[in-house]
Amino acid sequence: MTFESDREPAPPIRGALRTELVRDLALGELTHEQLGEKYGRSTQAVHMFSARNADEVRLAKQALVADPSDEYAGVAIARKLNRSADQVADSSSAGVGLSTRPWL
């Protein structure tokens, strides 16, 4: 059975909004349903985001435990992890950085 919705799909969660959602998930103060209402997403979308970004949420949670007073705790670590993964994926797909000498 297929259901059609009159609603347009929500835009992807990126940038500051994504960072805020990761932090909210790390804090664990709101349920997925409450986060869905806060960010204009379904509970299922928040759950899927949480599952896809579990490593980043975990890093943010560790940083929050280390310094709960830091408003941006964990954000820099998570962003660096994402940038590094993106760079590896880009260089692998382009064949850049591949060396015939394994010690390099």
Image (cartoon, grey):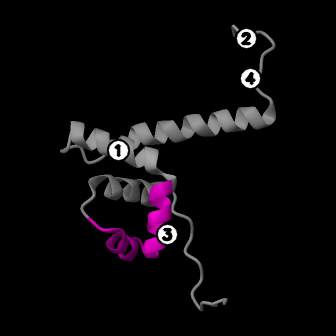
What is the CA distance from the residue labelled 2 to the residue labelled 3? 42 Å
What is the CA distance from the residue labelled 1 to the residue labelled 4? 30 Å
Element assignment for label 2: loop
Q: Is residue 33 magenta?
A: yes
**Magenta-tinted stretch:** 30-51
State if disc 4 and disc 1 touch (CB < 8 Å): no
**Which residue is pictured at 71% across the width and 38% down the height?**
90
Few, some or many C-alpha atoms within 10 Å of disc 4 (few <14, some 14-19, many ≥20)? few
| Circle 1 residue | 60
Amino acid at dot 3? Ala
Instruction: Give whichever of discs 2 and 3 has the lower sequence position.
Output: 3
Instruction: Give whichever of discs 4 and 2 has the lower sequence position.
Output: 4
| Circle 3 residue | 45
Amino acid at dot 4? Gly
Instruction: Give whichever of discs 3 and 1 has the lower sequence position.
Output: 3
Instruction: Give whichever of discs 1 and 4 has the lower sequence position.
Output: 1
| Circle 2 residue | 102
What is the CA distance from the residue labelled 4 to the residue labelled 3? 36 Å
What is the CA distance from the residue labelled 4 to the residue labelled 2? 11 Å
| Circle 4 residue | 97
Rendering coords of residue 18 (x, y %): 45, 57
